[in-house]
Amino acid sequence: MQIKARQFNAVVVEALAAIGTNPLLARLFSSRGVTNKNELETSLSLIIPPDQLTNNTQMAKLLADALIANKKILVIGDYDADGATATAVAVKGLRQLCQILESTAQIDFLVPNRFEYGYGLTPEIVQLSATNAQFGSSTQKPDILITVDNGIASVDGVLTANQLGMQVLITDHHLPGDITPAAACIVNPNQRGCDFASKNLAGVGVMFYVLLALRAELRTRGEFIGKTEPNLTELLDLVALGTVADLVKLDANNRILVEQGLRRIRAGACSAGITALLQIAGKSAEKVTAQDLGFYVGPRLNAAGRLDDMCLGIACLLAESADDAMQKAETLQALNMERRNIEADMQDSALTTLDAIDVSQQFSISLFNADWHQGVIGILASRLKERYHRPAIVFAEAGDGLLKGSGRSISSLHLRDALDLITKRQPDLIIKFGGHAMAAGLSIKQTDFEVFEKAFETVVRELLTEADLQAAIETDGGLQGNEMNLATAQLLSKQVWGQGFNQPLFFDAFKVVNQRIVGEKHLKLLLEKDQKRFDAIYFNHHDDLPENISAVYALDVNEYKGLQTVQLQLKHVELKPIELASGLN
């Protein structure tokens, strides 16, 4: 394991400190690419204006026409946390506008069951929408289909909708394929020709931007005269959850959206569903962090789409009472526990298979087991990628002689581009695929698994070097003894950290004063540095450590019976003291 120090700019650090930024935070921000104070502002008014998102104004006009004309609108969602929150934002926002406008437009949603229909706006989902869409107590064909977190690759689905007389509006953030769907309008920061300054909006962020533009369009038309304009900030808790859970890069624009959503949650002004999911997870809404949304709320919401039907998760997010939300959250909790058990069994099976293989001689991992659960293969791929630091794709049976695969990649390999290269060389091998740099999904014939395994290994070998396969941990260097305290831990916990703006990790040498096993598999330690002692925890590690170690750690706030203390959460341990070069540049 390579341990690297993040680089920071002393001039930037000094400039940030000069305007009152905590010196430690100034160093952390600089090493994450912040160059000026404007990138640290969190006012919602500072997000990139909605009219700068390509086609957003056109989309707003079409939706405004639809609401005023009392059209039937069906939101087509996706079965992950981003898709669920995007669906909830679309439904809540559009229904709120209908109420204010006194429009009788009908808004409902449909999420494809991943086990029956797969991903996105497929022709089958379009047909289902035309014949089974529920508006109130009646079944009627929608006038408009609006996709959230999907649609940019739905060429055939859009064609089918057009043939059936349904207008399609696409909101998505995934990378486009070679052919653009013939939708009435597409809003996607990653579509060709879009020069929106942030390419990192999650699907829920794109839908929020559409609603901002729609409100502006209705305001311009005078539709709010004598009425109360909708407060779209009420949706930011959902935007924050979906943005963090989807692991999109937390650039300055996304950090504003997440920070504003966290503020609403902490103030108790959030949806009953998120409140219930936090409560089920044993997390305090008043002290919620971005990491809490990613580690505790997102997985419980995702469990519905992985094992059952994401409609349950969306219903939880749309619940209007605390009791209803809690009832649905408890069901999600049970599904999440089942998911964890399935995942553990699958991981044991995968590791047994890989024990018989010299993974160090491979550049990639492709695995298939007929007993594996289709809804959990993405998590398993992620675990294997983390363990072996290689791109991993895991397959499960999808019926009709097909396999569905879910892949996760390391930073050096753009996974979707790798699959695209395979397709260009062997056009009949991959039936369909989609995704982005770090994650992708695909379908192949079961009889083609070994052919795909070889093709993927060949492409990955061409695109990576052996050096790329060396796992590394980036740290923020060491902390002074007077910085390793509760106040610093609390300061860090209040910041927005996440994908592309990583939680701070530090690296120091310690003396192990005491150690014991807790919870059967975790190591509880008392460490000493510069004559000061610190409580520490090393999760999922139960082997004794030597007296002198070097450790990568996060500075955490540990709360027990209402008392808060600082705790070091060890992430990696070197069994001897080593020095790390400075990150100053």
Image: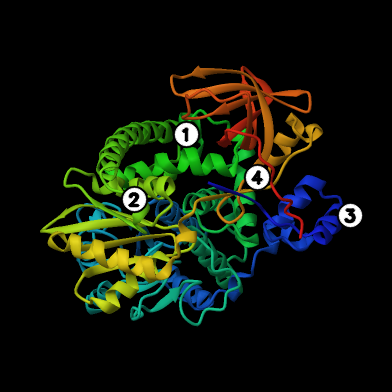
Q: Residue at 51% of width from left, 58% of height from top?
A: 248
Q: Spatial distance from mark 1 to mark 3, Cα to Cα?
A: 42 Å
Q: Spatial distance from mark 4 to mark 3, Cα to Cα?
A: 22 Å
Q: Nearer the viewer, mark 1 or mark 3?
A: 3
**Quadrant in which the C terminus is drawn:** bottom right
Residue type at the position of mark 2 = Val
Left or right of 72 in this view: 260: right
Task: Look at the image and tell me whether residue 166 can be seen.
Answer: no
Residue at the spot of label 4? 504
The mark that comes first in sequence, 3 or 2, is 3
Could you tell me residue 350's position as x and y percent? 28, 43
Task: Look at the image and tell me whether residue 449 can be seen.
Answer: yes
Per the image, label 4 sits on a secondary structure element best described as loop
Q: Name the quadrant containing residue 70.
A: bottom left
The mark that comes first in sequence, 2 or 4, is 2
Q: Residue at 76% of width from left, 51% of height from top?
A: 27
Residue type at the position of mark 4 = Pro
- Which mark, residue 359? 2
Q: Spatial distance from mark 3 to mark 2, Cα to Cα?
A: 50 Å
Q: Residue at 11% of width from left, 59% of height from top?
A: 401
Could you tell me residue 370's position as x and y percent? 16, 47
Residue at the spot of label 3? 18
- Which mark, residue 366? none
Residue at the spot of label 1? 276
Per the image, label 3 sits on a secondary structure element best described as helix
